[in-house]
Amino acid sequence: MNRSSDLKHLVLLNLSALLVSLAVIFVKLISMNAAQVVLFRCLIAGIALGLFLKYRGVRLWQQFKAYPNFFLVSGSILGLHWVLLFWAVKIASVSITILAVFSFPVITTLLEPLFFEMKLIRFNLIAALLTLVGIAFLVPEYNLQNKASLGVLLAVMAAFLIAIRNLLCKKYIQKISSTEQMFFQLCVSIILLLPFLFLERPIFNVSNVLYLLGLGVITTALGHTLFVYCLGFFPTSTASIIISLQPFYAIIFAMIILKETPGPNVFIGGILIVGVVLLENIRAAYYRSRENEKIS
């Protein structure tokens, strides 16, 4: 791959991170409850991905029959993750929510030995401790009556769920493509969230419809698909480091569009959390390159 091609895919990878980071902004602007926002996001993204897979000639029903338990479990987890995350966005600031949920890479390293044959190393424990300190800086007071504090708790719970979902997906990625995984997970989430459509009447106006389309098409279908496409041109470690920029993109968008200004504690907590994630990705990249050198 030549230098111009490298640059092109690096730009696309950054673009995917930027698009995905817009999700919390759209959620904040949509005047519906969190469950309804997730439901319509899944509907729009599911239709977009379904048409894409149909165009590709994928036999969807045969895939579902082959791995029903995986799709049902991972889809339920993904739907609940989004509900908790969007609930957190609704009641707390974007900066607090996005930084708290971004603890998921560190949580993933702690949970990974439970899913795969690998040992938990000392660095991961130190990283988890530093992340916990970073999260503590995000909490304004230890009282769940405080909306920001409740938002942090919900976002961390969402982080645990997405870490579990990602690890489940990793186990099946050799058997089921990421696009097919995402499609069926969206379908399961839709079925589980349909009752919320009748508990409270959703508000359909021009702005809500446009924001929902942006959330479903731009951030979910396009952003995630573009990220998966770029994974084929870079090591996973490089992609992970670029994705570490998501909180910064989201906070910048929140400052410009929502006029949110993070406090000093949020900056300190954010530096700790994102810094730990970056160090973990750099460390993993270093050891992976060492292993590749030994093999070659």
Image (cartoon, rainbow, N blue to C red):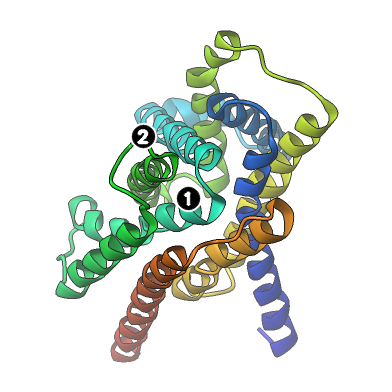
Amino acid on which the number 2 mark rests in the picture: Gln
Q: Position of residue 162 (x, y in %)?
A: 40, 46
Amino acid on which the number 1 mark rests in the picture: Thr
How far separated are the C-alphas under marks 1 and 2? 16 Å
- Front residue of this view, candidates 93 and 16: 93
**Badge 2 element:** loop
Residue designated by label 1: 97
* Quarter in which the N terminus is drawn: bottom right
Check the image and report above or below for 166 versus 241. above
Quarter of the rendering containing residue 81? top left
Label 1 Cα neighbours within 10 Å, binned few <14 / some 14-19 / many ≥20:
many
Residue designated by label 2: 145
Q: Earlier in the sequence, mark 1 or mark 2?
A: 1
Question: Do we see residue 215 in this rendering?
Answer: yes
Q: Position of residue 44 (x, y in %)?
A: 69, 32
- Front residue of this view, candidates 113 and 242: 242
Apparent side of residue 20 relative to residue 155 in the rendered image (left or right): right
Check the image and report above or below for 193 versus 199. below
Apparent side of residue 212 relative to residue 127 in the rendered image (left or right): right
Looking at the image, which residue is at 59% across and 8% down? 198
Check the image and report above or below for 281 versus 293. above
Q: Which mark is residue 13?
A: none
* Quarter in which the C terminus is drawn: bottom left
Looking at the image, which residue is at 38% across and 70% down? 277
User: Which residue extends farthest top?
Assistant: 198
**Badge 1 element:** helix
Question: Do we see residue 17 in this rendering?
Answer: no
